[in-house]
Image: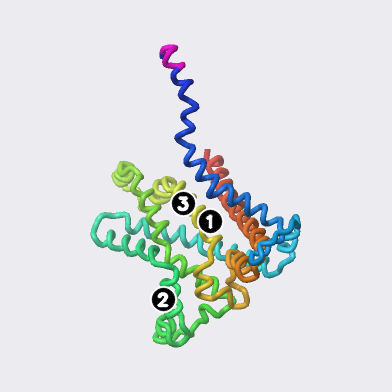
């Protein structure tokens, strides 16, 4: 490389920033600024109706720590994540393994599972509320025809949250399934051909070839679902409205009620900052565990 070429490269380096400037501007406008504004509002007593704001420091956070309803909604959200995320990972992986093959039937089933996630939450909740109606619902009639006792799917303190989690999995399991299908199709076929020549059992192929190759995809799907399910709201609002006895009310519903029903924007924003911290802790823990496993394997 000549001296003139090196001088030209050094002279052009400041212009590289022009390529990333649009992204940085959008990132700061749509993410960093709202995040900073939200943290600032959380330190105020902000009335949404009158737009009056008074600095109160950490008072909103102290009140949240003493609010039993907030403790309940945090526990409900963590339970929902703990129920739905493992099901998402296991079921979507099983579907991807079953449908990772050529043929019209597999293509039709892949499209069917994926299309369900395109439907609106209003349509999905309406269909499932009708199906889960006591006595006259499709599920109740199916139980009656088999002689099984009817279950209070949406009115039981113990079953309501589980039911919503299962409906959510049925609704959007197609998205992680497509991610796993993409990861499966990137595994070289030569590896499977070599295993077939050695007459390797299918379970050994799955545990020693497929699963290690899908490790990154599994972590990605788990992280995405933790973030998404921490923000669960519309299906809970439409199916149970947080009941019965606050056993299905989520943190996002609590934030919505505080901001737009109680008009206490500062308190709601403080709750949203706590939710953000919970999601960051969950994602960081997942990444740390994965890194620890990788390091141990080495």
Task: Kindly identify which residue carries mark 2.
Answer: 127
Magenta-colored span: 2-7
Q: Is residue 175 left or right of residue 25?
A: left
Counting the numbered discs, the total is: 3
Relative image position of residue 258 (x, y in whole percent): 64, 67
- Residue 237 versus residue 149: which sits nearer the camera? 237
Q: What kind of element bears circle 3?
A: helix
**Marks 3 and 1: which is nearer the front?**
1
Instruction: Check the image and name the residue furthest to the top.
Output: 3
Q: What kind of element bears circle 1?
A: helix
- Residue 17 versus residue 73: which sits nearer the camera? 17
For label 1, count other residues whose C-alpha is less than 10 Å away and answer few (under 14), some (14-19) or many (20+).
some
Q: What kind of element bears circle 2?
A: helix
State the CA–CA distance, disc 3 to disc 1: 14 Å
Relative image position of residue 43 (x, y in whole percent): 71, 55
Chosen colour scheme? rainbow
User: Image point 48% across, 25% down: which residue?
Assistant: 13
Q: Earlier in the sequence, mark 2 or mark 1?
A: 2
User: Image point 65% across, 60% down: which residue?
Assistant: 271
**Marks 2 and 3: which is nearer the front?**
2
For label 3, count other residues whose C-alpha is less than 10 Å away and answer few (under 14), some (14-19) or many (20+).
many
For label 2, count other residues whose C-alpha is less than 10 Å away and answer few (under 14), some (14-19) or many (20+).
few
Residue 218 marker: 3
Q: Are marks 2 and 3 in contact (CB under 8 Å)?
A: no
Please tell me whether the stretch drawn in magenta is mainly helix, strand or loop: helix
Q: Earlier in the sequence, mark 3 or mark 1?
A: 3
Residue 227 marker: 1
State the CA–CA distance, disc 2 to disc 3: 30 Å
User: Image point 36% across, 63% down: which residue?
Assistant: 113
Relative image position of residue 74 (x, y in whole percent): 63, 64
Q: Is residue 229 above or below residue 138?
A: above
């Amino acid at each position: 490389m000549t001296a003139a070429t090196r001088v030209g490269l050094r002279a052009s380096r400041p212009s590289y920033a022009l390529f990333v400037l649009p992204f940085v501007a959008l990132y700061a406008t749509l993410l960093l600024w709202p995040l900073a504004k939200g943290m600032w509002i959380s330190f105020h007593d902000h009335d949404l109706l009158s737009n009056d704001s008074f600095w109160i420091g950490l008072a909103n956070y102290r009140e949240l720590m003493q609010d039993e309803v907030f403790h309940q909604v945090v526990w409900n959200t963590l339970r929902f994540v703990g129920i739905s995320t493992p099901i998402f990972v296991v079921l979507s992986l099983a579907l991807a393994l079953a449908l990772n093959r050529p043929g019209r039937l597999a293509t039709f089933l892949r499209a069917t599972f994926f299309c369900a996630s395109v439907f609106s939450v209003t349509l999905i909740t309406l269909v499932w509320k009708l199906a889960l109606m006591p006595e006259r619902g499709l599920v109740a009639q199916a139980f009656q025809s088999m002689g099984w006792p009817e279950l209070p799917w949406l009115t039981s303190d113990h079953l309501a949250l589980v039911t919503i989690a299962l409906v959510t999995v049925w609704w959007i399991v197609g998205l992680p399934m497509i991610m796993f299908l993409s990861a499966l199709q990137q595994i070289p076929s030569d590896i499977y051909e070599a295993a077939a020549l050695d007459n390797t059992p299918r379970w050994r192929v799955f545990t020693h070839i497929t699963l290690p190759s899908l490790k990154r995809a599994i972590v990605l799907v788990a992280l995405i679902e933790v973030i998404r399910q921490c923000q669960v709201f519309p299906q809970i609002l439409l199916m149970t409205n947080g009941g019965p006895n606050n056993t299905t009310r989520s943190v996002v519903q609590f934030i919505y009620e505080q901001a737009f029903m109680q008009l206490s924007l500062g308190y709601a924003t403080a709750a949203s900052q706590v939710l953000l911290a919970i999601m960051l802790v969950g994602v960081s823990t997942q990444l740390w565990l994965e890194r620890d496993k990788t390091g141990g394997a080495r």
